[in-house]
Image (cartoon, rainbow, N blue to C red):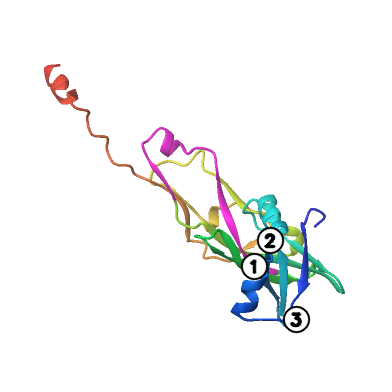
Amino acid sequence: MSTSPTLKVTQREETGRSASRRLRRANQIPAILYGKHTDPVKLTVDAREFTKMLISISGRKTIIELEGEGREKSLSFLQEVQRDPIKDIFLHADFREIRADETFEVEVPVVVKGEAIGVKMQNGILEIATHTVKVRCLAKDLPGAIEVDVTNINVEETVKISGLPQLEGVEYRDPASQAVISILMGEAEEPKPGEEAEEEKK
């Protein structure tokens, strides 16, 4: 919890498209904080600070402390970010509030570690069937990502939810039989021009 990034927020009253456009022109991002214990709170976040935070967490799932004038800090995680791919600007951010003493469910990214022997030595193709997995845990136990070492995986072998690393305080909520990473059989390499003729001469 000590390494949780802190993000300053401001509560907003105005809503609607026009208000949101004005905020974005002022380099602010409309946001919302919601949770099962409180009513949704409409917020604004500085776009520069938000971008810096995203860079710092590098795509991992992280607890974020939201603080603002006149309100207590809220523990949250980033549930969703809307972005305009053409203008390259953030449109909206959704934060989900949590409590330190309660478990919650969240999607956590899967990160592949190592080079599978099935790819390196057996002409296989690595396929990530599930890019995120659902876990249940306390805030202090939240893993930034589920790291899967594929070094010893052969062609036609699959890592399932049941085969993911067991982490203290973390419960996997997806079906145990669900595929996460597979090494598929690759296509046979076609001989290069002239190789068939050379083989026939031998």
Q: Please give the name of the residue rendered at 79% of the width and 67% of the height, measured from the top-left corner.
A: 100
Q: In this view, does 23 lie above or below 116?
A: below
| Callouts 1 and 2 close, C-beta under 8 Å | yes
- Give coordinates of residue 33: x percent, y percent: 71, 74
- Give coordinates of residue 90: x percent, y percent: 60, 63
Label 2 – label 3 distance at C-alpha: 25 Å
Given residues 14 and 195, the one toward you in this image is 14
> What secondary structure is found at the residue carrying circle 1?
helix
Q: Mark 3 points at which residue?
A: 38
Which of the marked residues, 2 or 3, is nearer the chain's N terminus? 3
What is the residue that sits farthest to the right in this orientation? 70
11 sits left or right of 107 in the view? right
134 sits left or right of 98 in the view? left
Tell me if residue 142 can be seen: no
Q: What residue type is labelled 1?
A: Arg
Q: Per the image, is 123 magenta?
A: yes
Q: Which amino acid does label 2 sit on?
A: Ala
Q: Which of marks 1 and 2 is in front?
A: 1
Q: In this view, does 98 lie above or below 60?
A: below
Q: Please give the name of the residue rendered at 40% of the width and 32% of the height, measured from the top-left corner.
A: 121
Residue 47's disc is: 2
- Give coordinates of residue 72: x percent, y percent: 85, 72
Which image quarter is the N terminus in? bottom right
Which of the marked residues, 3 or 1, is nearer the chain's N terminus? 1
